[in-house]
Amino acid sequence: MDYSPYDENSTYFYDVNQTDPEESVSPHASGCREMGCIALTIVNVLIFILGFCGNGLVIWIAGFKMNKSVNTTWYLSLAISDFIFCSCLPLSIASQVLGEWIFGLFMCKLTSFVMFLNMFSSIFLLVVISADRCVSVAFPVWAQNQRTVKKASLVVVLAWVLSMVLSMPSLVFRDVVSHMGKATCFNNYTSDPHSHRTVALSRFLGGFVAPFAIIIVCYSVIILRLRNNRMTKSTKPFKVMSALIATFFICWLPYHVFVLLELHQNWYDTNFISMGLKVGTSVAMANSFLNPFLYVFMGNDFKQKLKSSLLSKMENAMGEDGRTTSRYLSRSSSVDARLTATHI
């Protein structure tokens, strides 16, 4: 994360002109004792539980219960991205509670890398889905002949590779510094005075502005085509997609706003930027558990598969209990019959 829940102050923990960084690192509070910190910790724990379970459920349904299709390929990839991100949240939560980073340099870099991998892969997949919807509406015959699961899988792989490349700054600049016996995981931009601005702007433009510009163009075409075509059977897929895009926009906008404000942190109150980045990061995290709820509650296919899968599990469990009880009763009846015959 450019600013993670376990960071205590701004992205810079020491002045770029300092020769000994440990002399100017801000001291940390011992653990999470303030009400704001406790509230954010509770929110992050809920995000982890709901995101881990919800995305795991979507992976199970889309990956194993539904027929392979282009749409399930898109949504399965989104769920996998969110699931991987949620799997790393306990490290951030534990560090926030303890008030220090105890997991070493490798995990410091990895957790930040995973967050931005989730951000870029999610927005790129939303762009791909929007373009796919646009082509399907504008050129239905061509799309019917060309849209295949194999091609969709290839596009997903390319989106993931591009996301990994754009997430590399986390592996380069994330660092761990020790002060007063406590380690801190933070972004060390001191090697290049322009690196902070470059990374922040590239993430904002490449992971937010440009993708949404493409999405807006695609949806403009879709809306115009749907207005002129009254033969459209259902708009449900477009409602699900619109909800996914709106959720991503709402969740990630505060984070990017405060990251850009941090570039001019001398203009604003430090506590305001610090709290804004913490809240913005938690809101961005919330996107990882909201997606599966949109799949389940707005997608008819997901709801039907979920109901049928759960019902079948319950029926099997009940059936097994019934069969066990029947076998027990049949054995008891046969034993009673033998005992009765013996006494007679």
Image (cartoon, rainbow, N blue to C red):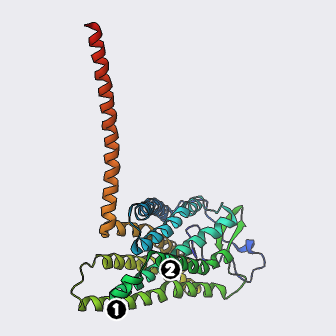
| Residue in the image at 45% along x and 60% along y | 56
| Residue in the image at 30% along x and 27% along y | 330
Q: Nearer the viewer, mark 2 or mark 1?
A: 2
Disc 2 designates what residue? 155
Q: Position of residue 15 (x, y in %)?
A: 70, 81
| Residue in the image at 35% along x and 85% along y | 136
Q: Position of residue 75 (x, y in %)?
A: 42, 71
Disc 1 designates what residue? 221
- Badge 2 vs badge 1, beta-carbon distance below 8 Å: no
Q: Amino acid at mark 1?
A: Val
Q: Amino acid at mark 2?
A: Val
On the picture, is 186 further left or further right than 65? right
In which quadrant is the N terminus drawn? Answer: bottom right
Query: Which residue lies most toward the top here?
Result: 344
Residue 153 visible here: yes
Say what secondary structure mark 1 lies in.
Answer: helix
Query: Which residue lies most toward the left here?
Result: 230
- Which is nearer the N-term, disc 2 or disc 1? 2
Task: Tell me the crowding category of disc 1: few under 14, some 14 to 19, or many 20 or more residues within 10 angstroms, Cα based.
Answer: some
Count of labels in the image: 2
